[in-house]
Image: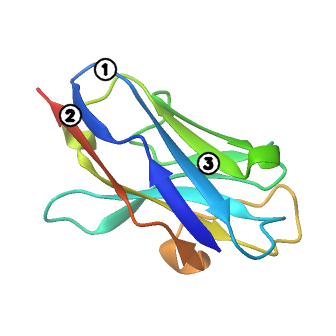
Amino acid sequence: VQLQASGGGLVQAGGSLRLSCTRSGRSTSRSVMGWFRRAPGKEREFVASISWGGGTTDYAESVKGRFTISRDNAKSTVHLQMNSLKPEDTAVYYCAARSGVYLSTTTYTTENQYGDWGQGTLVTVSS
């Protein structure tokens, strides 16, 4: 599975960005999708996850109420809508996939639960 992330950029605090991640390669069905981020000098951390059925989502506490993860299975794409951005959201954002998941409601929140990773897209939020 190849993952291509896009949509990063420079935005002022309070602004919005929409990240996208497109999957390709071997079968992408039944894939839980997630977003992680690595801020300068910090470990990579979980941001959001969505089940392959699309009906279950999970968020880090720091982004709840501001970020929304969604997916379009017909286009093999997952999005991360980021609103009310803060300088502390500045990071490289990575999309990740875990294929072959049985339950349509499963989400994953840790890195080792994902097998495929995209290259990352930089989000910079200025104060």
Image location (x, y in percent) of residue 39: 22, 56
Amino acid at the residue labelled 2 = Val
- Name the element at disc 3: strand
- Distance from label 1 to label 3 (Cα)? 22 Å
Crowdedness near tag 2: few (<14), some (14–19) or many (≥20) residues, C-alpha within 10 Å:
many
Left or right of 62? Residue 113 is: right
- Name the element at disc 2: strand
Give the colouring mode of the picture: rainbow
Return the mark for residue 15: 1
Which image quarter holds the N terminus?
A: bottom right
Q: Are marks 1 and 2 in contact (CB under 8 Å)?
A: yes
Image location (x, y in percent) of residue 121: 35, 53
- Distance from label 1 to label 2 (Cα)? 8 Å
Of the residues tagged 2 and 3, which is closer to the observer?
2
Q: Are marks 2 and 3 in contact (CB under 8 Å)?
A: no
Amino acid at the residue labelled 1 = Gly
- Distance from label 2 to label 3 (Cα)? 23 Å
Residue drawn at x 20%, y 34% is 125
Return the mark for residue 125: 2
Of the residues tagged 1 and 3, which is closer to the observer?
1
Residue drawn at x 70%, y 73% is 25
- Name the element at disc 1: loop
Dot placed on the residue nearer the N-terminal end, 1 or 2: 1
Determine which quarter of the picture holds residue 69. Answer: top right
Left or right of 86? Residue 119 is: right
Dot placed on the residue nearer the N-terminal end, 2 or 3: 3
Image location (x, y in percent) of residue 75: 75, 46
Kindly identify which residue carries mark 3: 58
Picture mark count: 3
Which image quarter holds the C terminus?
A: top left
Crowdedness near tag 3: few (<14), some (14–19) or many (≥20) residues, C-alpha within 10 Å:
some
Crowdedness near tag 1: few (<14), some (14–19) or many (≥20) residues, C-alpha within 10 Å:
some
